[in-house]
Amino acid sequence: MEILMTVSRIASICTMGANASALEKEIGPEQFPVNEHYFGLVNFGNTCYCNSVLQALYFCRPFREKVLAYKSQPRKKENLLTCLADLFHSIATQKKKVGVIPPKKFITRLRKENELFDNYMQQDAHEFLNYLLNTIADILQEERKQEKQNGRIPNGNIDNENNNSTPDPTWVHEIFQGTLTNETRCLTCETISSKDEDFLDLSVDVEQNTSITHCLRGFSNTETLCSEYKYYCEECRSKQEAHKRMKVKKLPMILALHLKRFKYMDQLHRYTKLSYRVVFPLELRLFNTSGDATNPDRMYDLVAVVVHCGSGPNRGHYIAIVKSHDFWLLFDDDIVEKIDAQAIEEFYGLTSDISKNSESGYILFYQSRD
Ligand SMILES: [Zn+2]
C-alpha cells in the first residue's frame, strides 16, 4: 500500500514538471492528497454566492460521492442535478491537481430554472443552498416515481404510492435531514404535546460575542406563548398560556448551520448585516437535543464554511473555506489558497458594533464522525 502510493506520487511529480503552481508547491508533492483536485470556479458576474456554496458542498464528502455516483448512472435529460454532476465530475477527473474551471453550464441552467437567480445581482448564498438541495431532492423523487411507473408495478398496485403522503427520503435527506421536535406545555393542565418537523439546515439567531453553541441554545430556549399568541390546548379545549421549545430529535449526518446575519431594520427599510463575533469550533457537539433523541452524542467536525464579506446581503462577496484531508483551503472564485487552521478565527466576525463590514462565517457545515 505504502509503496504503491509513493510510486503514484512520484509519477504525479514527473507530470507536473516545472509548472507546479504556487498552491501545489505550498502543499508539497509529498502531502498532496492522491486523487484530490483543487479547482477554483470562474465568476460569471456576481456568482460568488453560487461558487462558494458549490465548493463547500464539493468538500462535504458524502454529498460529493452521491453526486459523482449520479453522474455514472445512465444519461438523463439535462436538469440542475445533471449539470452539477457534470461539474463535480469535471473537477474530480482533471489531469491537473489545481486549476480553474468555468461552471458555465450549471450557471446557465440555474438562471433558466429560477428567475430569482436569472440576473447579475448578488444573491443570498443560504437561499441558493436551500434551493439547490430542495431541487435535487425533487429531481430524485420525480425520477424514482417515473421508474416505478415505467417499471414492474402494474396498474392494480398503485395505491401504495398514492397513500404515501411523504415520499421516501432521497440521499439529500439521508445526508442533510434532521428532525426537530416542537414541545408545547400547557401552563394550565401541564399537558405536553409535541410535533416533529424535518429540516435540511438550521437557521440560528446571532448575538454579539457568543459562540455557535450559545446560538443553538438560544434556538432551543423556552418561549412563553401568551396574550395574542396563546396556544389552543386540546385538553382544556380553549386557548391557554403555554411554554414552547424546539429541540433536535434526530441529528443529521451533515449539519448545515445558517447564521442569521442579515436582519431587516424597520427604521432603515432595508436589511443590514450583523457582523457580530460568533465563535464556531472545529469540533461540535449539540446540547439542544431532546430526551428521546436517537443519536444525541454525535460528534461533529467542521468541514466547510461559506463566508460573507461585506456589509449587506445585496453587496459584498462570498468565499468558502474548506477542510480537505488535514489542511484548510480558501476558495475565492477562481483563486485557491492554503490557509492555517488558526486563520479560521479571522472569520468569526467583529467585536466592534460600529463596523458592519466584515468577513464572517455565514453557513457552517459540520460532518458527523460516525
Ligand atoms: Zn391545557
Image (cartoon, rainbow, N blue to C red):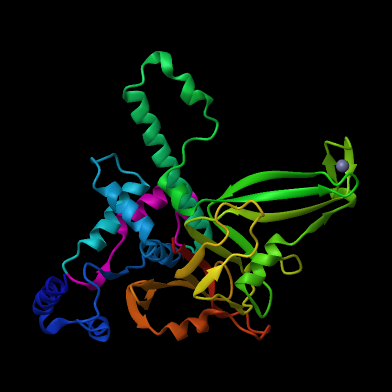
Vertical order, 313 against 174 (above or below)? below
Q: In the picture provided, is 346 more to the left or to the right than 194?
A: left
Residue drawn at the location 70% of the way across and 66% of the way down: 218
Q: Quadrant of the N terminus?
A: bottom left
Residue drawn at the location 30% of the way across and 47% of the way down: 70
Residue drawn at the location 69% of the way across and 55% of the way down: 246
Which of the two residues, 134 or 358, is positioned nearer the viewer here?
134
In percent of width and height, residue 50 lies at 42, 62
Q: In the picture provided, is 246 more to the left or to the right than 249?
A: right
Q: Does the magenta stretch include residue 115?
A: yes
Is residue 316 among the parts visible in the rendering?
no
In percent of width and height, residue 255 lies at 51, 60
Give the residues drawn in magenta, as a range.
Answer: 96-120
Which of the two residues, 346 or 111, is positioned nearer the viewer here?
346
In percent of width and height, residue 270 lies at 67, 66
Q: Does the magenta stretch include residue 212?
A: no
